[in-house]
Image: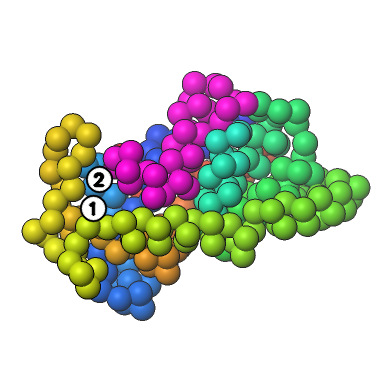
Amino acid sequence: MRNAWASAFLAGLVALPALAAPSTEEACRNLSSKPIPAEIMTAGFYGAHPDMRWRNAGLEAYKKRNYAKALRDFKRAANYADKFSQLMVAHMYWEGLGIAADHPLAYAWVDLAAERNYRSFVVHREAYWAQLDEQQRAEAVHRGQAVYARYSDSVTKPNLERELRLATRNMTGGRTGLVTGALYVTDVNGNDISGSVYYDPTYYRPEMYWCDQDAYWSRPMRSNVEVGPPQTASPEVDTR
């Protein structure tokens, strides 16, 4: 039961959805989440998106019950502002998976994961808070300051944005930076991938990337909090 709340995520949350959009404002207004095409999920793509890379590594280790490795990998993803990975770190501290259980520190991490006020993440935060006594709450608030100083959006978003901009500078296209369907990227297996798909600006323009994540994680999810760890189930979770 202690891991049940995470099962809905683990089946398919290996990469965030993405969609083409002509402008940031329009993307934020009219997002309609869809999975990232499987064919672009190459080593090069993950190299430009370390949040996805380390989240995936954490999920794989978690599924294999290699909890110590999973915790390390989720923290690496957390260093690139990956809120789901921060939520998983909270869960692992709460349950003592890969490390000694530490409820005040678990709350500090779940509070961080809920920093953008995604509803399902806030549900988890409030469930954790309800189970702490007054001394634990005071400790959680105190220790949370160091967690925020190291992993808050203001610190970790720039880490990922640097990687995205570096990848953008390495794009192959016209001198003006235009990438068209005539450009193809060849993966390690010799398969050609359309440049307009591989280099969709939603994957590389930081403001659009964050907007897309917000649209995905803000989707309504059915939540059921019982005695013990919070449990979240969503019939809309993509499998990919």
Residue toward you, 112 or 227: 112
Q: What's the residue type where badge 1 is placed?
A: Tyr
Q: Quadrant of the C terminus?
A: top left
Could you tell whether 185 is left or right of 88 in the image?
A: left
Residue, x 22% and y 57% (percent of image)? 172
Residue 159 in the image: state x and y as whole percent: 54, 56
Residue range (magenta): 41-70
Disc ID at residue 40 = 2
**Quick one: label 2, few (<14), some, or many (20+) residues within 10 Å?**
many
Residue toward you, 219 or 15: 15
**Callout 2–callout 1 Cβ contact below 8 Å:** yes
Residue extending furthest toward the right = 135
Disc ID at residue 198 = 1
Residue 184 in the image: state x and y as whole percent: 14, 51
Residue extending furthest toward the left = 182
Residue, x 23% and y 53% (percent of image)? 198
Disc ID at residue 71 = none
Q: Is residue 223 visible?
A: no
Residue, x 42% and y 65% (percent of image)? 206
Secondary structure state at the residue bearing disc 1 = helix
Residue 83 in the image: state x and y as whole percent: 54, 52
